[in-house]
Amino acid sequence: MVDFDRARQVMVDGQLRAGGVTDERLLAQMSRLPRELFVPEPRRNLAYFDDLHWLGEPGSRRFMPAPATLAKLLKLAEVAAGDAVLDLGAGTGYATAILAGLAATVVGLEQDAALAASANANLATLGIANASVVTGTVDQFGPARFDVIIAQGMLDSIPAAFFDVLKDGGSLVALVRTGPVGLATVFSKSGGHVAARREFNAWLPPLFGALRHEEFIF
């Protein structure tokens, strides 16, 4: 029988703090949230391993990032308490739940409708009322804009539609493919212009799975 509380603390101390994640608000959220709730039942005993988990039906290519990789990306976002956040590739809602404890509101987009339903059920189980996960396309938000956008997966390039829903003064964090790995990059929008700051190398599967990056459908 796995002691999930102990495993969670070992993850925070041995993977996150040891990996350079020092944001105490983020560490507190990841210390509190039961990651095992978001992992497929057969792999729950492995929920706190430094590894990603494949989600959904075989071949769906949906996944939950490894804890340290996710935490380092979320750290780059520097989410503030009043922010509206868009979580791309929400899966079963783990990152969405973390972000809900850091921001004012969070919307997750997930291309797999069954996973989106599971994510909303998980958020409800935890009593998280300021976040939800939807399916659809990025442009469904109309005039709505987000202070922070997080992409949970590798991208060849950033679709223009992502920047369209980013507020002026906002930031988008994504892994941009450079050969076999990705560069964790912070895109900052100011005065309608976007500047990029590259931080570290990492790897995740493609954000869109089998979809072409131009399609950006969730």
Image (tube, rainbow, N blue to C red):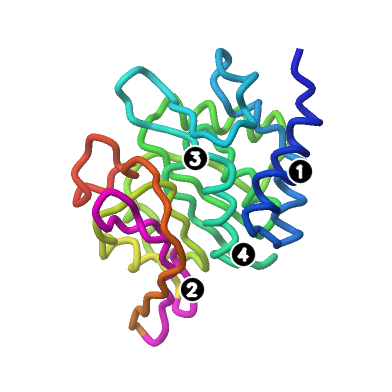
Q: Where does label 2 land, which residue?
A: 170
Q: Secondary structure at mark 1?
A: helix
The Cα atoms of the two marked residues, 1 and 3, are separated by 16 Å
Q: Nearer the viewer, mark 2 or mark 1?
A: 1
Few, some or many residues within 10 Å of mark 2 (<14, 14–19, 20+): many
Q: Main secondary structure of the magenta part?
A: strand
Q: Where does label 3 land, which residue?
A: 65
Q: Where does label 1 land, which residue?
A: 31
Q: Amino acid at mark 1?
A: Ser
Residue at (73% x, 48% y) in the render? 29
Q: Position of residue 115 (x, y in %)?
A: 46, 28
Pick whichever of labels 3 and 2 is earlier in the sequence.
3
Q: Where does label 4 land, which residue?
A: 79
The Cα atoms of the two marked residues, 3 and 4, are separated by 19 Å
The magenta region covers 168-191
Pick whichever of labels 2 and 1 is earlier in the sequence.
1
Q: Is residue 82 above or below residue 105?
A: below
The Cα atoms of the two marked residues, 3 and 2, are separated by 23 Å
Q: Nearer the viewer, residue 59 or 161?
A: 59
Q: Amino acid at mark 3?
A: Pro
